[in-house]
Amino acid sequence: MGEPVIRRAAAADLSELSRLWHEKRTVQQQFDRRLTLAPDGRRLWQRSAAAWLDDQRCAMMVGAGAGGLLGYAIGWVQPNPPGLLPESIGAITDIALDAHAYQGGLGRALVQALREWFRQQHITDVVAYVPYRQAVEQAFWRSLGAVEWIDILWLK
């Protein structure tokens, strides 16, 4: 079977990436009804992701195996508010793994690839967007040494 290859996403990956995105979001909305998928959400996400491939502030990493894509992680360079150092931080805004097969170590490998890309952008401080109600995702990030930093509150 072999280890998955970690690489930058390509346009040819977008259909499969959107499948992984949609699968993850479908599960997430079961735990948090505030998250509602648009009827054409998968298509809209795929169209946006196509633009991200050319955005110098974004890196989309994929884990590819013999059977296709096994997961992805998306990272962005984000500016800090003026007057704060560092001027920019890295933000890992999404990570998804194929739920239909064991992915031992793939999440860590994807995060490591993003961290290396951030280092190439001269960024050492990284945050991760992690849903509060997703205990498995919370545990994953904590196992990597992440600690709570800021609360994002939902107003409706």
Image (cartoon, rainbow, N blue to C red):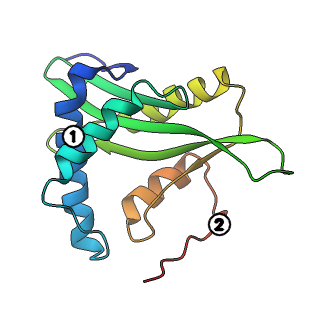
Q: CA distance from mark 1 to mark 2?
A: 29 Å
Q: Residue at x 70, y 32 (%)?
A: 123
How far from the left and from the top, in percent, is residue 106? 36, 33
- Give the residue type that dot 1 points to: Ser
Q: Is residue 34 above or below residue 11?
A: below
- Left or right relative to 68: residue 49: right
Asked if residue 36 can be seen in this view, the reply is yes
* Location of mark 1 (residue): 18
Of label 1 and label 2, which has the lower sequence position? 1
Could you classify mark 1 by the number of other residues whose Cα lies within 10 Å: few (under 14), some (14-19), or many (20 or more)?
A: some
On screen, residue 143 versus residue 24, left or right, reads right
Which element carries disc 1, helix, strand or loop? helix
Say if 95 sits above or below 134 in the image. above
Which mark is drawn over residue 150?
2
Marks 1, 2: nearer the viewer: 1
In x, y percent, where is residue 138?
Answer: 46, 60
